[in-house]
Amino acid sequence: MHDADGCWALIVHGGAKSVAPDQAEANRAGSLAAAQAGAEVLRYGGSALAAAEAAVRCLEDDANFNAGIGSVPNADGDIEMDAAIMDGTTLAVGAVAAVRRIRNPIGTAAKMLEAVPVLLVAEGAERFARDQGVPLCEPRERLFPLPACSIEHDTVGCVAIDAAGHIAAATSTGGLSGQHPGRVGDSPIPGAGLYADDQLGGVAFSGDGESILRTLLAARVMQALETETATPAAEAAIARLARVGGEAGAIVIDKTGRIGVAHNSEHFALALHASWLPDARAALHSSELKDVLDHD
């Protein structure tokens, strides 16, 4: 187990989806860059919260992922983004939804950790961001050319544990391509798209938001972590989807630093790093990382 002082670990995902062959390298490289950004924070004694935010911000800045600048348009052709971050030490949650003018929604979600509300949406979230000194952009300023492959389930996320044993989880998404304006999925909802608790672990999901919301998958993972390690907890949650159907993937770190992954999608863009690994690792399927998942 990796519960000794000074040990840290981090895992990111770029979406539970099918990755076209011509997008494979971009997904690997983007996920790897995000894991390295988060690991750089942890390596020098930074917090799990700071690492998770840094990793997700990196993914938001990569147009190959459906978050931040790569967000897909809704039915009106507008961009609406959701993001959330959770502190496993205090159980504080910061979340924003349906925002259009915030370049990096995860940064505003992080500022929400100190606010009274858990979740702010649309113009209310943008007003909060402006009051916090976050520069706003024009809604269409972020509309970059999108990859040819479908990225409808391309939510991004991160789970991290720092050297002090504190855990954080973060998510960000542009939602579904062509979605009804105002639609909010699972990503900014604690207990559905993410959760973190130092006493158990942390989790972040990607996939069919409505199915994840209906089955409270993050809550299922946390419940399983009371008796299971990271990968079995993730697998148990994905199995719950059978009742409602749907595609999803989960990344998990338990309180001892074990890393777990489960998904029923064809691919799952992943990358991880830890103090006990020589280098960061990237993958497009959990089977590529089986030698380091739930590793003792």
Image (tube, rainbow, N blue to C red):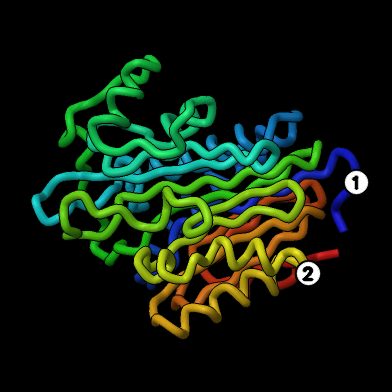
Circle 2: residue type: Thr
Along the line of sight, the residue nearer the viewer: 235 or 16: 235
Specify the farthest residue to the right: 4
Task: Mark yes or no: residue 64 visible.
Answer: no
Residue 232, compared with residue 142, is above or below; it is below
Instruction: Answer left or right for 240 relative to 74.
Output: right
Q: Residue at x 27, y 23 (%)?
A: 136
Residue 89 image offset from top left, x and y in percent:
70, 38
Q: Name the residue under label 2.
A: 227
**Which quadrant of the rendered structure holds the C terminus?**
bottom right
Specify the farthest residue to the front: 116
Residue 39, compared with residue 283, is above or below; it is above
Q: Residue at x 73, y 40 (%)?
A: 166
Q: Name the residue under label 1.
A: 4
Distance Cα–Cα, label 1 vs label 2: 20 Å
- Res 272 → quadrant: bottom right
Mark 1 vs mark 2, foreground winner is 2
* Nearer-N-terminus badge (1/2): 1
Q: For numbered disc 2, what is the local secondary structure?
A: loop
Residue 132 image offset from top left, x and y in percent:
40, 17
Q: Residue at x 53, y 73 (%)?
A: 263
